[in-house]
Image: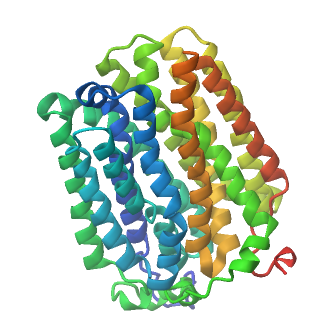
Amino acid sequence: MATQSPGGTSGSPSPTRTRYWVIVFAVTLALVTYIHRVCISLAAPVISSDLKLSKVQMGWAFSAFVIAYSAFEIPGGYLSDRYGPRRVLTWVVTWWSIFTAATGWAWGFLSLAVARFLFGAGQAAGFPNLTKAFTIWLPKTERTRAQGIMWMSARWGGALAPGLAYLAIQAVGWRVTFALFGALGVIWAAIFWAWYRDNPRENKSANAAELALLDGAEPHAAGHGDVPWGKMLRSRHVWLLCLQYFCLGYGWYFYITWLPTYLKEARGLELGKSALFSGLPLFFGGIGSIFCGFALSRVAQRIGSIAKARRLMACIGFSGATVMLLVASQLKDPLAAMLAMGLASFSNDLAMPPSWGAAMDIGGKYAGTLSGAMNMVGNFGGIISPPSIGYILQVTGNWQLTFTISSAVYFAGVFCWLFLDPVTPFDRSAEAH
């Protein structure tokens, strides 16, 4: 007996699932992105020894990536709005993969910092372009869940990176390791270019019923170079969205920069065990992302508001990260401390799907640009955090102080969400006039 299919009439074919391949590409790129990004944290002690770098120099090498990553977020998002994700992602993934490999060619501080800077310039466009692809290829009801799946994959890629880096460094050394990881991105870019299209109607695998689900996607495709910058900059909610992401980024960057060094120096763990423990926060973070991605819609149905649901999940996330990071710093047993830090990361990532979902809704057809702006400000936290920790350690040797500061910044994120409208497009908001 014929049934009513979503997006179709009684008796019409069921929608195809071609759109889910966009999620597959996002998942695989998220894995590659974080393997490329996080592997340097495990390699840092070896790199510092070989290149004779101080803690402050290593901290600035970490930040060189984040400085470029932040600086090129808005241009990367703008390019996705203007030219579409197909061209932009293919080019930038190839670019950053080359400079992942170039990290292994460094001969001193300056060459390492330059390689990491150029690597960050390419990675800046990654997640804004994937977010843009979601607004084109997915109906609104599926976007937040897709963000949860993507960020789970990103975090788990980061969780795998220390172990993969450890095995590769033991087998072929740190220089060849970066070359091998860089090759992964080049392969992804070639496959993506061959399959992806900026307009779903150009992909012959999608049937009419699936295209009906995506009705209204074409206005979100490429060609939006006329970003109303004045309205965006005058929107209080745009500023709050960006500021809460700064609070998220400041504390989170510790996990992918200084954590292995902390485990070695403050907890006395050797490199192999440090690699295992270093992956725990990102593993737990991935669980937080996917949990929130699936739970958010149910919470919204229960309380009758997607805005309130996003606000609730984000506030729980920031509060949990604040408390659990302080708990982790007080525990004596390394495993217990890392499990507590894992719960801090889990809480951190409860705020991820609400943040990126809000960027898609507040941004509308300018989602690429706004998500780039949000990610840029979030990564200002990553610019400040690694060298600040380096200076604190050099002057005081006090790891506890670094955790206290990160917890305070986390807690500030709660107040941003209390006053944030995470659903109204900025170009329609009364405050944007």
**259 to the left or right of 111:** right
In this view, the residue in front, 189 or 150, is: 189
Q: Is residue 394 above or below residue 4?
A: above
Quadrant, the C terminus: bottom right
Q: Is residue 403 above or below residue 303?
A: above
Q: Is residue 142 above or below residue 296?
A: below
Residue 179 point in image, percent of width and height: 18, 48
**334 to the left or right of 197:** right
**7 to the left or right of 421:** left
In this view, the residue in front, 381 or 148, is: 381
Residue 13 point in image, percent of width and height: 45, 87
Residue 383 point in image, percent of width and height: 54, 45
- Report the number of numbered marks: 0
Q: Is residue 123 above or below residue 234?
A: above
**Which residue corresponds to the image point at 58% horizontal and 73% vertical from the top-left?**
369
**Which residue corresponds to the image point at 78% horizontal and 64% vertical from the top-left?**
237
In this view, the residue in front, 192 or 294, is: 192
Answer whether residue 349 is visible to the viewer in this image. no
In this view, the residue in front, 60 or 36, is: 60
Residue 149 point in image, percent of width and height: 49, 55
Q: How is the image coloured?
A: rainbow
**Which residue corresponds to the image point at 35% horizontal and 86% vertical from the top-left?**
203
In this view, the residue farthest toward the left is: 172
Answer whether residue 202 is visible to the viewer in this image. yes
Q: Name the image quarter holding residue 9.
A: bottom right
**Which residue corresponds to the image point at 28% horizontal and 27% vertical from the top-left?**
52
